[in-house]
């Protein structure tokens, strides 16, 4: 019983140190960055510490991309390229080159996401962290 309690408390403490959904902080626990590359193309990245799993990092990246899409008047986005890196001091990142589109545009090629669906799916998980 005591071992289970210690394990639960340890997990709770470590989970509290995972990277939250937030803008990037150089001396913090990570976060997102994004920049326009021209036209409807954007570069969006998410940096996390070693206590944040790859699935959570990917979900935070998708959520941020959906926010960028909506903020710039787009309804859809397609990820044309992703790069995952594992840096020093336990930081990991996932970078995506993203094409944005409006609902009136015909989309071919990449796997396209509806920004509103991504926001609805991951919003409850990450919205309270901003």
Image (cartoon, rainbow, N blue to C red):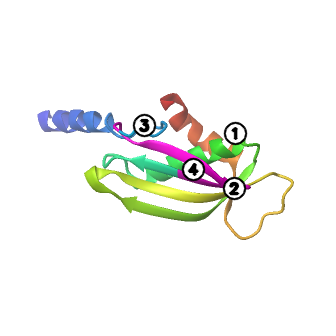
The region drawn magenta spans 27-44
Residue at far right of view: 104
The residue drawn where x is 49% and y is 37% is 23
Crowding at label 4, few (<14), some or many (≥20) Cα neighbours within 10 Å?
many
The numbered dot on residue 38 is: 2
Query: What separation in Å lies between label 3 and label 1 (alpha carbons)?
Result: 21 Å
Crowding at label 2, few (<14), some or many (≥20) Cα neighbours within 10 Å?
few
Helix, strand or loop: magenta stretch: strand
Crowding at label 3, few (<14), some or many (≥20) Cα neighbours within 10 Å?
many
Image-based side of 125 in relation to 37, left or right: left
Q: Are marks 2 and 4 in contact (CB under 8 Å)?
A: no
**Disc 4 marks which residue?**
62
Q: Earlier in the sequence, mark 1 or mark 4?
A: 4
The numbered dot on residue 71 is: 1
User: Element at badge 4?
Assistant: helix
> Toward the viewer: 52 or 4?
52
What is the x, y in percent for residue 21?
47, 38
Name the mark nearer the viewer: 3 or 1.
1
- Residue 124 is one of the magenta-drawn residues: no
């Amino acid at each position: 019983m005591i071992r289970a309690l210690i394990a639960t408390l340890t997990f709770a403490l470590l989970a509290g140190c995972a990277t939250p959904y937030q803008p990037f902080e150089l001396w913090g626990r990570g976060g997102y960055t994004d920049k326009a590359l021209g036209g409807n193309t954007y570069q969006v990245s998410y940096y996390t510490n070693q206590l944040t799993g790859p699935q959570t990092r990917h979900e935070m990246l998708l959520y941020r991309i959906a926010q960028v899409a909506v903020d710039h008047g787009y309804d859809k986005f397609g990820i044309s390229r992703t790069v995952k890196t594992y840096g020093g001091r336990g930081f990991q990142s996932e970078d995506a080159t993203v094409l944005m589109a409006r609902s009136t545009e015909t989309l071919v090629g990449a796997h396209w996401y509806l920004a509103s669906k991504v926001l609805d799916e991951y919003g409850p998980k990450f919205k309270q962290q901003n």
